[in-house]
Amino acid sequence: MECYICLEPHFVCLRTERRRRRGEMGGGALLAQLLGFCFWGSLWLAGPVAAYSGGELGKAAVVVDGAAAIAVTDEDFVCATLDWWPPEKCDYGTCSWGLDSMLNLNLSNPILLNAVKAFSPLKLRLGGSLQDKVIYDTGNPRQPCVPFLKNTSEMFGFSQGCLPMSRWDELNEFFDKAGALIIFGLNALNGRVPESDGSLGGPWNYTNAASLIRYTVNKGYTIHGWELGNELSGSGVGARIGADQYAADVITLKSIINDIYQGFPVKPLVLAPGGFFDAGWFTELPPHSTLFKESSAAEALLPLPGLVKQEELTTVATIWYLDQLGMSATYNTKTYCRQSLVGGNYGLLNTTTFHPNPDYYSALLWHRLMGKHVLRTNFTGSRMTRAYSHCAKESQGITLLLINLSGNTTTEVFVTTKTAESTREEYHLTAKDGDIHSQTMLLNGHILAVDSDGHIPELEPVKVAASEPITVDPFSIVFAHIPYFHALACR
């Protein structure tokens, strides 16, 4: 089978062959079929290439356009959350949060510290459903600092809770050691009154929130962004606020930030709304809400729905997770926040041991390899293959992410250039023993696990000659750093 070869020095032709394997009754023989297509990487957009296989026209192609970025993410695109849920939070037959709340998380655990530090930095969003029921024990206003108590008649099944400043100090000491970037979700329901339409009205009583912000500044703690409320836009989750009032409250928060951080060369972001997109609600924003629109655009925080059970935090889940990261980046999403870092049966870390789940290693590789400039990557052909490409992070060339959703098809990608003796770096993620439900992940055939001192393992690539294909096994993931792809978008 012939693949169209490009001759211009500024083009890279990536030829792929898909080997489809079929098990047969008794003999277990494999029947290999060559289904060819060209995978183009170029400084200008190349058209898709059709190739022939077995007498059939297989129109499968991937086109990477390196002329210009189609989207730009934050440098710290990968984000995770810490939540407020107490141990009594139980649903779906389990009490899955344990001691993983911000109020009781073991901050002295070395695995937890090393897991966050490995990102250098990891963006952490502090918040969740209960954030609008938290008071801050700053002494302004004075009121008892009591923990969350289970109460089924209350919103989300818990009474009002409290953040002691001693705990806030401990958290910030941990964040400083770990080098984390912090987004803090403020209580936006103080002062609200019920409205006839079911929403909560009245201006936000910002006194307690402002006192926390001032305490934080006086202590010298660095906050990347302050977020107003949790899921209060549109129809809300548990509670909702009208667009007009919410816009006014965001402007108030912006004014508070400007006042308290007066004289600071860089001020924290004001983030809003931390909720679902509702077209009707957004169209109701008043003309004077320019600040609100700007702050909303500053970060796009996308929590990962808690739909995965602990026993499903496996390779099959991490395939889905990376696909979500890839798609979100192409839509100019600035930050993708995973719910959660730890806790709730869907954390990047194990709820009790803090040992990394497979998704943790996927997130860490993305963070280290995928730069902020997103390249147009078009795939036509099998729906079982995903391809994403970014400018490489802090290095030359591009990083190509290939995801094979098929359990019985191997994909080979041939990278053809005029550069002699070039090599690339590949990171192959697979499940232990080929079991996609395994919670043990392999990198280039080696088990990923922390050592006895709680250190995160080194994520070492294999170096591959440019003449060799990138092989994407069934149900596997490959990050390929291709330094000799000289894209204009990456200069």
Image (tube, rainbow, N blue to C red):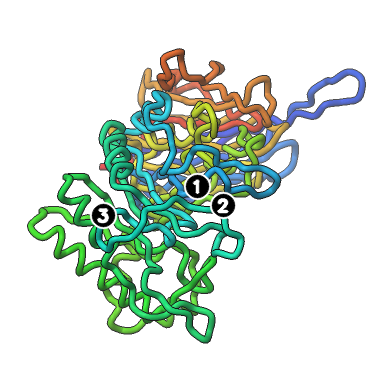
Q: Earlier in the sequence, mark 2 or mark 1?
A: 2
Is residue 395 visible from the viewing direction of this image? no
Are the residues tagged 2 and 1 within 8 Å (C-beta)? yes
Give me the disc on residue 138: 3
Q: Single out the mark in the foreground, 1 or 3.
A: 3
- Name the quadrant of the C terminus: top left
Residue most toward the bottom? 196
Residue indicated by mark 1: 339
Q: Secondary structure at mark 3?
A: loop
Residue positioned 69% across, 48% down in the render? 92
Type of amino acid under label 3: Thr
Circle 2 Cα neighbour tier, 10 Å, few/some/many (<14 / 14–19 / ≥20): few
Type of amino acid under label 2: Pro
Distance in Å between CA atoms under marks 1 and 3? 28 Å
Residue indicated by mark 2: 305
In this rendering, would 476 be left or right of 122? right
Q: Earlier in the sequence, mark 1 or mark 3?
A: 3
Above-or-below relation of 264 to 122: below
Q: Secondary structure at mark 1?
A: loop
Type of amino acid under label 1: Gln
Residue positioned 20% across, 62% down in the render? 257
**The quarter of the displayed image where residue 105 is located:** top left
Q: Single out the mark in the foreground, 3 or 2.
A: 3
Residue 60: x percent and y percent? 62, 45
